[in-house]
Amino acid sequence: MGSLAAVFVWWMLPLEPFFEEISGIFLAGVAGIYFSGRFSGYLGVRDPDVIVVDEFVGQFISLLWTEHDIIHGLTAFLFFRFLDIFKPGPIRWAERLPGGVGIMADDILAGCLAGVLTLELYRMMPA
């Protein structure tokens, strides 16, 4: 499962400057669009289960703005998994885009929304 691997990597990595994290995720996302599109075309399957870079990138996006602790990481993970499984609204639409863009876009959108939900949840909680 790519999302669980992303949480593990996020937890193990030292805190990096935000620009470096964004740059790494951007490059992984671009590579994911290209290679997942090619690989799914080769297999003849729209979104093969063996491709997990989409989940990794989406999950890592949800963790970018959170506190670097296990509670925030677990919360972002749960929000991301919920959104990735049920695909509400625009996440479902993004999944229907062609090729590698569709493979990656739904998880990128789910990651962005999971990150916002995590931030808002902890912002609303009393200190």
Image: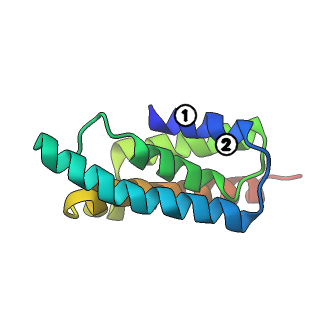
* Image x and y of residue 12, in percent: 73, 36
Comparing 56 with 68, the one in front is 56
Identify the residue under disc 1: 5
Is residue 58 shown to the viewer in this render?
Answer: yes
Per the image, label 1 sits on a secondary structure element best described as helix
- Classify 31 as above or below 80: below
* Image x and y of residue 47, in percent: 23, 45
Is tag 2's residue or tag 1's residue first in the polypeptide sequence? 1
Q: Amino acid at mark 2?
A: Trp
Instruction: State the quadrant of the N terminus.
Output: top left
Q: Amino acid at mark 1?
A: Ala
> Residue at position x 42%, y 45% from top?
53
Please, which residue is most extreme toward the left here?
A: 44
Identify the residue under disc 2: 10
Q: Which mark is residue 62?
A: none
Crowd around label 1: few <14 · some 14–19 · many ≥20 (10 Å): some
Please, which residue is most extreme toward the right here?
A: 127
24 vs 108, left or right, is right
Q: Quadrant of residue 44?
A: top left
Crowd around label 2: few <14 · some 14–19 · many ≥20 (10 Å): some
Comparing 16 with 96, the one in front is 16
* Image x and y of residue 84, in percent: 40, 46
Is residue 92 shown to the viewer in this render?
Answer: no
> Residue at position x 61%, y 46% from top?
76
Per the image, label 2 sits on a secondary structure element best described as helix
* Proximity of marks 2 and 1: CB atoms separated by less than 8 Å: no
13 vs 63, left or right, is right
> Residue at position x 77%, y 56% from top?
16
